[in-house]
Amino acid sequence: MRDQRVLHIEDSTSQIERSKWVLDSPNPPPLWKKLFSSLKETLLPHGNKLCFSSKNKSFLALAYSFLQSLFPILVWLKDYTISKFKDDLLAGLTLASLCIPQSIGYASLAKVDPQYGLYTSIVPPLIYAVMGSSRDIAIGPVAVVSMLLSSLVTNVIDPVANPHAYRDFIFTVTFFTGIFQAAFGIFRLGFLVDFLSHAALVGFMAGAAIIIGLQQLKGLLGITHFTTKTDAVSVLVSVYKSLHQQITSEEKWSPLNFVLGCSFLIFLLVTRFIARKKKKLFWLPAIAPLLSVILSTLIVYLSKADKQGINIIKHVKGGLNQSSVHQLQFHGQNVGQAAKIGLVCAVIALTEAMAVGRSFASIKGYQLDGNREMLSMGIMNIAGSLTSCYVATGSFSRTAVNFSAGCQTAVSNIVMAITVILFLQLFARLLYYTPMAILAAIILSALPGLIDINEARYIWKVDKLDFLACIGAFVGVLFASVEIGLLVAISISFAKILIQSIRPGVEILGRVPRTEAFCDVTQYPMAISTPGIVVIRISSGSLCFANANFVKERILKWVVEEDDIQETAKGNVRAIIMDMTNLMNVDTSGILALEELHKRLLSRGVELAMVNPRWLVIHKLKLAHFVDKIGKQWVFLTVGEAVDACLSSKIATA
């Protein structure tokens, strides 16, 4: 009997000691220290570890270590071999054969001159190659961002009436895009990009692909007057009106554009189909766009088809990127619009690039540093805005070609950029007779990769709310505008988060037989509840103004229900144990709700116990003197200890 009493005293002592671990946990770091740590982890190698090891390092070693963190090329370049260079050279040349015609086509989609698309395939890839952490991603202009720019910027400046102002505004938007992307990386704000969820991105990409495809009817049909709106109805109406006007006007409309464009579109799609069936022929769809440009240009030049109604590119300015520093517009009434459009482009470009980069990184088994990727893409777009480039990001189609071609490192981007430079220096003038219909065919051939029906089916199967965001983005982009599509997708995603925050999971726990685990009695019917004690777990990261009253009312309702059930047989509820393991934060509304809950429970003769509150939660509860109100003896480290303490107390057994 004496031994049992000694064991009970030792258990009580150890339980009190463990409760002190919870109550005496260190205070969380202040906000400024968190921001400083985030900045240091982003810019310095190994974060805080650098400070502890700096005493044993020279200044030069520290500087080189910092440069390695800022320029990952310095890390892997030490182990770079000739065999890797051969693979990167082949991948880069293959990439360039696809990049050159696509860049020209995407420039027309963005409503800027062709050379600006080629410029965008030079400076940003070179900067990303030395700063980026992905080995596979191919940098340059992409269809979705090009369409996004043209649809948003044309609402501010008319590219037909004032092409130079439009071009300068595009460069300004690109600068702001880079600023936002770099800020996301430096201050570790990548979570902002995640507000455009995967499901919303699937719907947005599909809707954008269809809109881009409809806009290419202008090039395929040789239409000269076309709408600046991007919704499907406006585009189709514009196509009908323009065709009717051209056919009935004195100027004869030629169907040669349509015939030529469709012929090469079929050729491009066939090469893609063949490559899917035979993986070894991955290079075929990669070089097919360049072959299409060469062949169609020769056909038009030799047959003088431009005299018969074929629309051609005409002049393409050669040479290297020119400085655009003095063309940036930081004064005037449109600066705010440029910043707003830059923010939208930053989010879309980063979302696409991160999705592409992570997909191929997981295949090869290496880790992608998200914040460093954002910083590198921000720097490359800032530099691009100063060198006549528009917004660049990672391209899925070109990254797939780069991967299939066997790239080993980001040197393939360098090879691609050098090839584009040589092309601009030597062959740009040869593009004079390139038909616009071929550019439309090249863009159309790349669009099927943006429409993922299987992924949409998967989203519908797994999560209906996610599918609603997917469909909302798709319908919004297709029938309203890009802005509406993004707004609908983000609104639905926010609504989903809000619903989950307002109605968090509040579970009653029971002890699973032959274990010390306490689990949800609904999920585990075999779990046994303790008479007179209700164990509750809040399955939410925060107890705040949005959900505090809901949690309080749910707990009080359960107490009343348990009293009604137990009063005849086993006695009323005498203690409520709240498992706060999942609770990361609490605000003043949450604390007020806990205080009111405690008062209401005391009025019914019920004690309130807390289990394992996180350090930020316990810190705030101590500052609000809530711990003093419930009593320090009612704070526990584990649910089992809390239940045992309640059972052994007079309150629980009364």
Image (cartoon, rainbow, N blue to C red):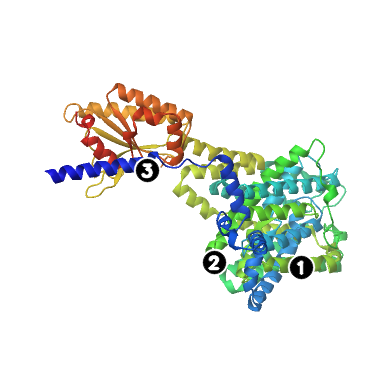
Report the front residue among 450 and 596.
Answer: 596
Q: Which mark is residue 481?
A: none
Q: Which residue is mark 2?
A: 364
Residue appearing at x 48%, y 29% in the figure: 588
Nearest to viewer (mark 3 / mark 1): 3
Nearer-N-terminus badge (3/1): 3
Nearest to viewer (mark 2 / mark 3): 3
Q: Which residue is mark 1?
A: 418
User: What's the distance in space between the residues labelled 3 and 1, CA to CA?
Assistant: 61 Å
Type of the residue with mark 3:
Trp
**Quick check: 496 left or right of 506?**
right
Q: Would you place residue 349 above or below residue 100 in this image?
A: above
The secondary structure type at the circle numbered 3 is helix
Type of the residue with mark 1:
Ile
User: What's the distance in space between the residues labelled 2 and 3, CA to CA?
Assistant: 44 Å
**Quick check: 116 left or right of 367?**
right
Nearer-N-terminus badge (1/2): 2
Report the front residue among 138 and 203.
Answer: 138
Q: Which residue is mark 3?
A: 21
